[in-house]
C-alpha cells in the first residue's frame, strides 16, 4: 500500500481526536475512544470492548480506537499492513 494512502487513512479520525483531546483527557483519561469518521462513537474501558461495539454498530469497516493519554502514541493499522483490509 502506498505510504500516502496509509498516512491519509485515519486523517479525519486523528483530527477529531486532536480537536477533542483536552476534554477527553479531563473526563476519560486511561480509557479507549472509538472514532468513526468525524464522530466520537464512544469511550470504553478496553480496546477489545471498543472494537466489539464498533463492529456491532458500523459493521466490518476499519475502526479508529485510541488510548486517551497525554503521551504521544504510535499509530498503526495492522489489518491494513497485513492486507486483511484495503482502502480501495
Image (tube, rainbow, N blue to C red):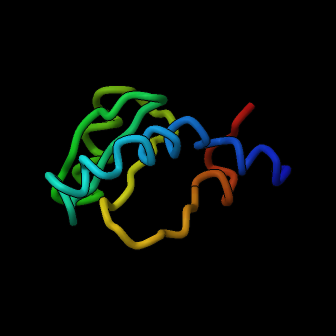
The location of residue 56, given as percent across then percent down, is: 29, 31
Quadrant in the rendering for residue 3: bottom right
Image quadrant occupied by the C terminus: top right
The location of residue 36, given as percent across then percent down, is: 42, 32
Q: Of all residues shown, which one is farthest toward the right?
A: 2
Q: How many marks?
A: 0
The location of residue 35, given as percent across then percent down, is: 39, 38
Nearer the observer, 65 or 40 = 40
Horizontal relation, residue 38 to residue 80: left or right = left
Quadrant in the rendering for residue 81: bottom right
Horizontal relation, residue 78 to residue 31: left or right = right
Q: Which residue appears at 77% of the width and 44% of the height?
A: 5
Q: Where is 66 relative to 72, above or below?
A: above
Quadrant in the rendering for residue 58: top left
Nearer the observer, 29 or 66 = 29
The location of residue 55, given as percent across then percent down, is: 35, 36
Q: Which residue appears at 18% of the width and 55% of the height?
A: 26
Q: Which residue appears at 54% of the width and 69% of the height?
A: 74
Q: Where is 72 relative to 83, above or below?
A: below
Nearer the observer, 49 or 31 = 31
Q: Of all residues shown, which one is farthest toward the front?
A: 22
Horizontal relation, residue 33 to residue 19: left or right = left
Nearer the observer, 47 or 15 = 15
Q: Which residue appears at 48% of the width and 29% of the height?
A: 37
Amino acid at each position: 500500500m502506498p505510504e500516502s494512502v496509509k498516512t491519509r487513512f485515519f486523517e479525519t479520525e486523528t483530527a477529531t481526536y486532536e480537536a477533542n483531546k483536552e476534554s477527553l483527557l479531563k473526563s476519560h483519561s486511561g480509557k479507549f475512544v472509538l472514532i468513526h469518521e468525524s464522530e466520537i462513537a464512544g469511550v470504553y474501558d478496553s480496546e477489545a470492548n471498543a472494537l466489539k461495539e464498533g463492529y456491532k454498530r458500523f459493521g466490518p469497516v476499519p475502526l479508529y480506537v485510541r488510548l486517551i493519554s497525554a503521551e504521544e502514541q504510535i499509530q498503526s493499522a495492522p489489518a491494513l499492513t497485513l492486507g486483511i483490509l484495503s482502502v480501495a
